[in-house]
């Protein structure tokens, strides 16, 4: 098997794995939190607090990430659903 074919197979496996993970709410929340605090992303606990069509709000109940510039805790996150895929963003407080 030549090198080009190996790279194509490995890239295909990685893309399929990533797309599969993007269908999980847990992965979407942890991936979004990871960019603020990698340690919080691995140890956080959360619960759903509100749900609307295509969007759910989640509150991090344990090990919420802390924003460095304001020293505030980022506890409320929003998960958007686009077909089978889910993407999380920080929602804000209030």
Image (cartoon, rainbow, N blue to C red):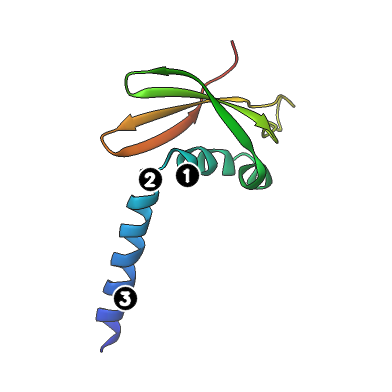
First in sequence: mark 1 vs mark 2: 2
Q: Secondary structure at mark 1?
A: helix
Residue position marked by numbered label 3 in the rendering: 7
First in sequence: mark 3 vs mark 2: 3
Q: Quadrant of residue 64?
A: top right
From the viewer's perspective, is residue 78 above or below residue 23? above
Verify CB contact (< 8 Å) between mark 1 and mark 2: yes
First in sequence: mark 1 vs mark 3: 3
Q: Secondary structure at mark 2?
A: loop
Which disc number belongs to residue 22?
A: 2
From the viewer's perspective, is residue 33 above or below residue 8? above
Quadrant of the image containing the N terminus: bottom left
Which disc number belongs to residue 27?
A: 1
Q: Is 20 on the left-hand or right-hand side of 72? A: left
How crowded pointer 3 is (Cα within 10 Å; few <14, some 14-19, many 20+) is rated as few
Measure the C-alpha gap from mark 1 to mark 3: 26 Å
């Amino acid at each position: 098997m030549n090198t080009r074919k190996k790279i194509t197979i490995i890239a295909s496996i990685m893309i399929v794995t990533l797309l599969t993970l993007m269908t999980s709410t847990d992965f979407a929340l942890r991936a979004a939190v990871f960019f603020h605090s990698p340690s919080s992303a691995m140890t956080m606990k959360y619960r759903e607090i509100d749900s609307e069509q295509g969007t759910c709000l989640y509150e991090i109940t344990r090990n919420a990430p802390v924003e460095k510039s304001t020293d505030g805790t980022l506890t409320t996150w929003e998960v958007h659903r686009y077909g089978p895929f889910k993407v999380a963003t920080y929602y804000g407080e209030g």
